[in-house]
Image: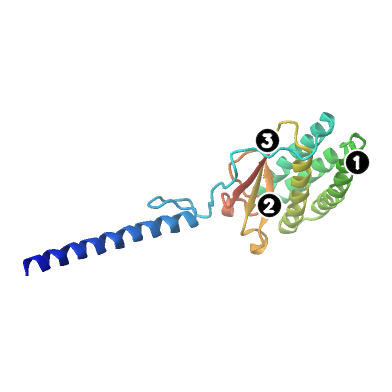
Amino acid sequence: MKTRSILFLLLFSATAFVFLTNCSENKQVEASETHEPAGQDTTPYTFGSTASEEFSKPQFQVDASFQEQLSSVFSSYVKLKDAFVSSDAGKVKAGATETYEALSKVDMKLLSGAPHNDWRNYLSPLQSSLKEIKASEDIESQRKNFSTLSEHLYKSIKAFGLSGKEAFYGFCPMALNNEGAYWLSDQEKIRNPYFGNKMLTCGEVKEKLK
């Protein structure tokens, strides 16, 4: 009788150990899936960085002057992005004008072959998006065109590079009525241009470029 009781106690202890272990593992999986470490509080709407530590290299090797001109476009774009972060439609219009001027100084003649053709494909939507942003007084309409601008500037930077300057490609899944939208920044820290102070840190870095 005593032996049976001991066996029962051992069986119960083993079952309890397996249950507690599985529960702990499930909690860790759930925390990983939601980007929230177990037992640690996180800032609402912050998804964290999922980008690789490595920076993506440009697809083409092009004239350094072209890279420098594209880098100037990116610098102006960052000011435009910051204007969206502050949700200031007036500053956005000024930033779009400055970015358009920088874009007009990019010399297409410095490219040939496939890089030349790719740049022509990127240039038109870049120009159109900036014109739409400049023409609008509505910040949400401007943000929609900013999404298109960001997409094609990202493709341009990924193709040609920025002469060593770093760019971070961020994504917010809640932007544009939950359609999701991307943007570029010169820093890894998330500053969301689609919501500003409403959800400043909503998003994650998807890729690093230079």
Residue in the picture at 68% in, 60% down: 176
Q: Is residue 72 something one can see in this rendering?
A: yes
Q: How many marks?
A: 3
Q: Residues within 10 Å of mark 3 (few under 14, many from 20)?
A: some
Measured as percent of width and height from the top left, residue 150 is found at: 74, 49
Q: Which quarter of the figure has residue 25?
A: bottom left
Q: Is residue 86 something one can see in this rendering?
A: no
Of the residues tagged 2 and 1, which is closer to the observer? 1
Residue in the picture at 83% in, 48% down: 122
Residue annotated with mark 3: 166
Tell me: 97 left or right of 172. right
Residue annotated with mark 2: 182
Q: Secondary structure at mark 2?
A: strand
Measured as percent of width and height from the top left, residue 79 is found at: 71, 40
Q: Residues within 10 Å of mark 1 (few under 14, many from 20)?
A: few
Q: Secondary structure at mark 1?
A: helix
Q: Amino acid at mark 2?
A: Tyr
Q: Which quarter of the figure has residue 178?
A: bottom right
Tell me: 71 left or right of 205. right
Q: Compared with residue 100, is residue 179 higher up or lower down, i.e. above or below?
A: below
Marks 3 and 1 sit apart, C-alpha to C-alpha, by: 26 Å
Mark 3–mark 2 CB contact (< 8 Å)? no
